[in-house]
Amino acid sequence: MPPVVPDVIPDHFPAGTTVKFTRSLDDYLPSDGWAYTIYLNGLTQKFNKAASVVDNIFQIEFVPSDTASLNPGPFRYAERLTNSGTGEVYDLTGDELVVNIEPNVGSAAAGAFNTWEEQTLVIVEAAIAGRLTSDIQAYQIAGRSVSKIPIAELRTIRGELRAAIWRQNNPGRLGVAHKVSFDLENEGQDYPPTWTDVTGLDR
């Protein structure tokens, strides 16, 4: 079964993969002479792709070679409609016109998908265990080399990193659930009253 082709621009996708989407724009129909091109503009790279037309709907497809060389990160995009007959050119407007291009898992370096907290935790653990290698001794946390941070402080940092990673992996949860039980061996014991009527009004 072929994948469903959405009628919206994806907000993220991995570089070097096939991306398909359509655009049904009643005010800019191909039959009225309109053509569609999407432009992506990143920090150091840019890319554009013209749409084909099927059943009066714009069809856009990024083939793997289109995006394989793009660096991961946010790309601002513009949907540009042009009409060769009238000479009109319009860009569609919106609130969040950004596509996040993710690393290609097939070619990305090890650790490319780890967060800063996950990467730093590995180094902190190595420092606590005394297993810092020469290539990570100069790694800095808050401007200080990890090899210069006292062990007690590293343990505190480790706890903070573990908590941050847990929150990243469990969005919307406050913490780990624990089962709690209470001893009921004195359940039948008589206790003196905690309140005594001294007004005489209840007699």
Image (cartoon, rainbow, N blue to C red):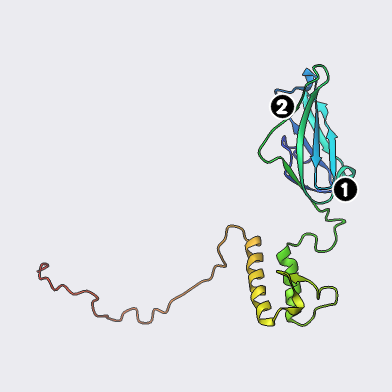
- In the picture, measured across the screen, residue 83 lies left or right of residue 201, that is right
Q: Going by the picture, which residue comes out furthest to the right?
A: 65
Give the residue pinned by disc 2.
Answer: 25
* Mark 1 crowd level (few <14, some 14–19, many ≥20, 10 Å Cα): some
- In the picture, measured across the screen, residue 109 lies left or right of residue 170, that is right
Q: Say whether disc 2 or disc 1 marks the residue closer to the N-terminus.
A: 2
Please state which amino acid type lies under the numbered disc 1.
Ala
Identified at 51% across, 71% down, the residue is: 179
As rendered, which of 200 and 37 lies closer to the eye?
A: 37
As rendered, which of 177 and 89 lies closer to the eye?
A: 89
- In the picture, measured across the screen, residue 118 lies left or right of residue 156, that is right
Identified at 80% across, 45% down, the residue is: 42
Give the residue pinned by disc 1.
Answer: 68
Local secondary structure at mark 2: loop
Give the x, y percent position of residue 122. 75, 72
Q: For the C terminus, give its image quadrant.
A: bottom left
As rendered, which of 60 and 75 lies closer to the eye?
A: 75
* Mark 2 crowd level (few <14, some 14–19, many ≥20, 10 Å Cα): some
Local secondary structure at mark 1: loop
Q: CA distance from mark 2 to mark 1?
A: 29 Å
Give the x, y percent position of residue 189. 30, 81
